[in-house]
Amino acid sequence: MLKAGTAARRRSLAWDEPQTPAAIREQVATLLQGVGTALQAVQSHWIGHVKIMVSAGSEAMYGSVTAAGDRPQWAGQLRTNTALAEMTVYAAIYNLTDAQVAEAVDTTLARSGLTS
């Protein structure tokens, strides 16, 4: 059986101005792409899961990719503008170590500009 390196991070998000659901979805897509690119620097054709869930009140949405270069798949949706949300980033990538996956996730989060 293949081993997968994993990393999970949770962040509280806060914006000065309420964000539209479309703007938050765009930020999640950018974050997914950033994690994917960071993982490609370690293993150019990675396979696994990168998921980002954002919840605000009783609403939640998430985007996910399962391989290098994938387009995000979406589930759920936010329906209202929000200035506060919770975000969970989870990555499990085959044939990488926990440390390699954590570095890709942490580096991308640090560069994202999202408030924690």
Image (cartoon, rainbow, N blue to C red):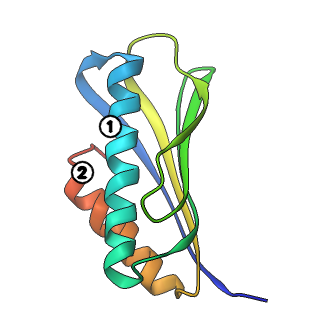
| Quadrant holding the N terminus | bottom right
33 shown above or below 72: below
Label 2: which secondary element? helix
**Could you tell me which residue is drawn at 41 percent across and 41 percent down?**
12
Q: Looking at the image, is 78 positioned above or below residue 60? A: above
**Callout 1 environment at 10 Å: few (<14), some (14 to 19), or many (20+)?**
some
The image shows residue 33 at horizontal and vertical percentages of 35, 53
Could you say which quadrant of the image residue 18 lies in?
top left
Would you identify the image quadrant in which residue 59 lies?
top right
Find numbered disc 1 in the image and state the secondary structure of the residue it sits on: helix
Q: Nearer the viewer, residue 96 or 14?
A: 96
Q: Callout 2, which amino acid?
A: Ser
**Which residue is identified by label 1?**
27
Q: Is residue 89 above or below residue 28?
A: below
Amino acid at the residue labelled 1 = Gln
Residue at the (38%, 41%) spot, across then down: 29
- Residue found 52% across the figure and 86% down from its top: 96
Q: Residue at x 58, y 87 (%)?
A: 95
What numbered label is drawn on residue 62? none
Look at the numbered discs 1 and 2 and tell me whether their residues touch, using CB distance below 8 Å. yes
Q: Position of residue 69 (x, y in %)?
A: 42, 59
Q: Position of residue 90 (x, y in %)?
A: 55, 59
Q: Is residue 67 left or right of residue 106?
A: right
Crowding at mark 2 (Cα within 10 Å: few <14, some 14-19, many 20+): some
Q: Which residue is mark 2?
A: 112
Upstream in sequence: badge 1 or badge 2: 1
Q: CA distance from mark 1 to mark 2?
A: 9 Å
Q: Nearer the viewer, residue 3 or 54?
A: 3
